[in-house]
Amino acid sequence: MAEDRRLLDPAVLARLSNLYLVARTVVEGSLTGLHRSLHKGSSVEFAEHREYAPGDDPRYLDWRVFGRTDRLYVKTFREETNLKSLILLDASGSMAYRGRGLSKLEYAVYLAAGLSYLMVNQKDAVGLMVFDSAVRRMVKPASTSRHLHHLLEQLQVTAAAETTNLGEVLHTIAARARRRSLIILISDLLDDPERVLKGLVHFRHKYHEVLVFQVLDPDELELPFSGPHTFLDLETGDRLETDAPAIRAEYRKLVGDFLETYRKGCAEHNISYVRALTNDPFDHFLHRYLERRARYS
Amino acid sequence: MNFLNPLWLWALTGAALPILVHLFARKRGKVLKFSTLQFLRLSQLRTGRRRRLEEILVLLLRVLALACLLAALAGPVSRSRLFGERETAAVLILDDSLSMAAAVNGRTASVRARELARSALASLPEKSEVAVLTFAGRRLPFTRRRDDVGRWLDGIEPGWTAGNLPAALEEAFGLLDRKTGNRIIYLFTDGQAYPWRNVVRSAKDGRRPALVLALAGPPAAGNLTCREVEPVPGRRRARCTVSNWGDRPAVAEVSLAGPAWRLARSLEVAAGESRSVDFDLPEEAGRLEGGVAAAGDPLAADNVCRVDLNASGPRRIMIAGSSGPALFYLEKALALDAETTGLELFSRESAGLSATALAGCGMVILADPGRLAPAVSAFLQDYVRSGGNLLYFAGDRVLAADFNRDWQAPGGTEFLMPARIIDWPRLAVPVRIAWAAAEHPLFLPFGSRALEYLKSVNFNRLVRLEPVDGTVLMRGESGLPLLLEKRVGRGRIMLAAFLPGEDWTNLVFKPGFPVLMQHLARYLSGGNLLAVRTGEVFRPLAGGGRLFSPEGSEVPAEPAAGGWRLDRPGFWRLVPTASGTARERVISVNPDPEEGNLARIGAAEVRQRLAGVTVEFLEAEQALPFLERGAAARDLSDTLLRLALLLILAEAGLAAFFYHLKHREGRHA
């Protein structure tokens, strides 16, 4: 429990508890919650009046309106339902990179924990998949407090390993996810953008809402190192001797193009894409993101 | 291109240092774990070509700058016209010694030397200054008028002397010391080694003018020289000695000619050896001419040697001293076969030496004379200066302090003896002869085996001598001088560090002792014949007179030289001006027989003798093409230093520019 508290810092939770995670689109849920259902029918919350048409259930006729207006109207209701979310956490070798603060994986774990806590608190079901070149661990979605502990434990033991095969992994998971869900991908996306985007689109084709958090270290954007260095690839172990200042300009241009590819690709397929830098306090980032998301929804 | 300090060229390998540093000491930096190399690799690929180009450019500039710096230290001089035709000061030295008359394929070395000199003259840049010197001392001062130089060159013919190469070189260096710009000395010679024997020069400043030595023609095959004609005293006979300088035996026709007769005999002379032939004279002869002839002999000028028997008599030798055993052995050795040797001995006490006693003596031998009376000492000094010869055996009765004081010239700083006495060391073991100047005429009878023979001689007692300015002829082990020679005025003094007695040395028991002493006596007393070498200045012993050349014309004296220069061989006549008992004397003038030795000097020895001077040694076949291309050398050190500085500045500027560019791009990105 102490470890859970370490992951979910009270200061972070204090901010998150004032927010509601509102899904952009309505998904099917088995529990009544704060999310709007796809189906309008008998439920707690009144939605609107509609002129009666043959075939409407006479039980929903509003007799009071008929008494006042002499016209037949039926009442429609918005059904409150629970959100089912699946957090996909990239634990490949590249996520182990640590700049001056948290490593990317640590940052991603905090992010996943925060989101899980928030959703469970809202009675939404949340699941977890940890992957690198394949799916390594899976926690099925649930919304109980016990489940949250289990999920957080799984996050706690997550360590970076192996190489990335993000595109393939996304296809595999998309093929297995039947019910419409909120797919939250937390990764550095350091793989072939075309293949990754195809994997994400696969989710969209199955009517999942997709939310992508691209976690990067500022070093990966800036290449701020001075003088010659021998760079060691965290995934493959390859070495490269180079003078960072000499290639910095070209490097930044390439990384910029790479990020732009993701931004455009996600926008094109109605996928939420958010870039997180490890030097941003993750709670601030999450707060800001959810606030913005609530405003637009 | 040549280099004044070629040793520095080894340092040129250091120019590769920046490359080695670049390759092996390249800074690899820290190892940094990074998420992915894909962007780094791609960036490096895209920027790599430009960066490599920059690195190569900077590296090239560094290597070039270092190479220029090191090459400048090596003192490069170039004769390529690529480096411009700067004003050049050139001194042409032409060998006009006797040996230059040696002919190969019908052309003398002198003719070839003049051709080479003209080629060199033509190759010099327009405004060059040219001076000409010869071994014999002729000189044309610096001039820019080529026609004058050309005409002057045409007038140079081989003389009768060996000339003075060291003096010519010194003068050339002196002339060019005052010149700036390109400076060069051309030396056109047959390459004869003999004139180089006294050339030792070391240019320490490394900025001496370059010297181009061009050999005039191919080497001449062996040469025969008529070395000496001398009377055999007591008999109506004359001895003719010839030398074969070649490297193979020669059959020579040796002849002796009088006014109206000629005798000849064939003689085989081994390579590098001298042999004598005795001729019975058909009549009371006066002037004799000995000769030698052989097929293919390249040099005729040294084939004749003259002597006037009437001008000579027995060689009178005075022996004085206080050492009984030494006098005994000396008299025995010199008197042996006196009839043949022509040595006439007189003995006196040292105190009895006087002008009268020494009249007509060609040589005085002093064996441990003790301290000489001041009058005797002064007389002996005058005797030597005026042409007499002294052989001094230092013994234990001669005190060092007295000796070193008495032989100091009065009123001057000159010490007349070739060495000072230091002390009489106690020898634990006998000292052997370790070195002898085998080429000295003194050792001629022993041929090439002189040192081999002399090594069997040892000394139980010695006087330790400190050479002053004499020539050491023999040294013992540990370098102790044993026998020294010095020219004083017209005479010579020889100083021995031992007494010829059994207490001192076993030399007196050697069969070679009489031979050595007789030859020494003949060598020192030879002046009595009035036989001199061509080119020497003749100063009569007493009085003056009028000198007539072999052709009969009167020759004016050279006041500067203090006598007459006898510049060609023949019988010269000295006619006294005052009437009285003095009679006319005939001087037999012959070339230096060593001039007949045409053996050449090698490039290595020339460079060794002219340390610090860049020498371009041109063999005969290389000389003309080389000179036609132009040999005016230009010192490129300054140019290279300036270039090195420019390259260093360019390298620094370029490196800074690239560094700035790299970081600016980084910041902007």
Image (cartoon, coloured by chain):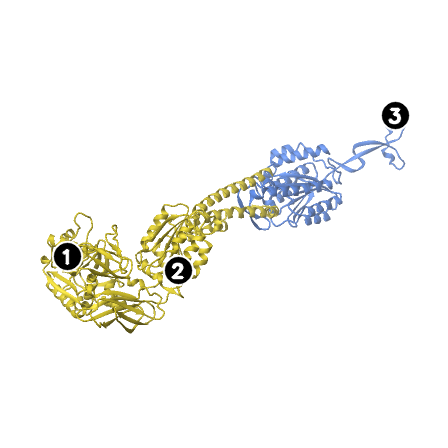
Chain colours: A blue, B yellow
Which of labels 2 and 1 is toward the front?
1
**Where is residue B16 drawn, in percent x and y?**
47, 51
- On residue B580, the disc is 1
**Where is residue B476 drawn, in percent x and y?**
22, 61
Horizontal side of B170 relative to B653 (left or right) equals left
Residue at 40% from the left image edge and 65% from the top image edge: B106
**The numbered mark 2 sits on a residue in which chain?**
B
Which element type, helix, strand or loop, lies under badge 3?
helix
Horizontal side of B216 relative to B341 (left or right) equals right
Question: Quick check: B354 above or below A2?
Answer: below
Q: Is A263 in front, or is B397?
A: B397
Residue furthest out toward the top: A68
- On residue B111, the disc is 2
Q: From the image, tell me which residue sits under label 3.
A: A68
**The numbered mark 3 sits on a residue in which chain?**
A
The kind of residue on which mark 2 rests is: Val
**The numbered mark 1 sits on a residue in which chain?**
B
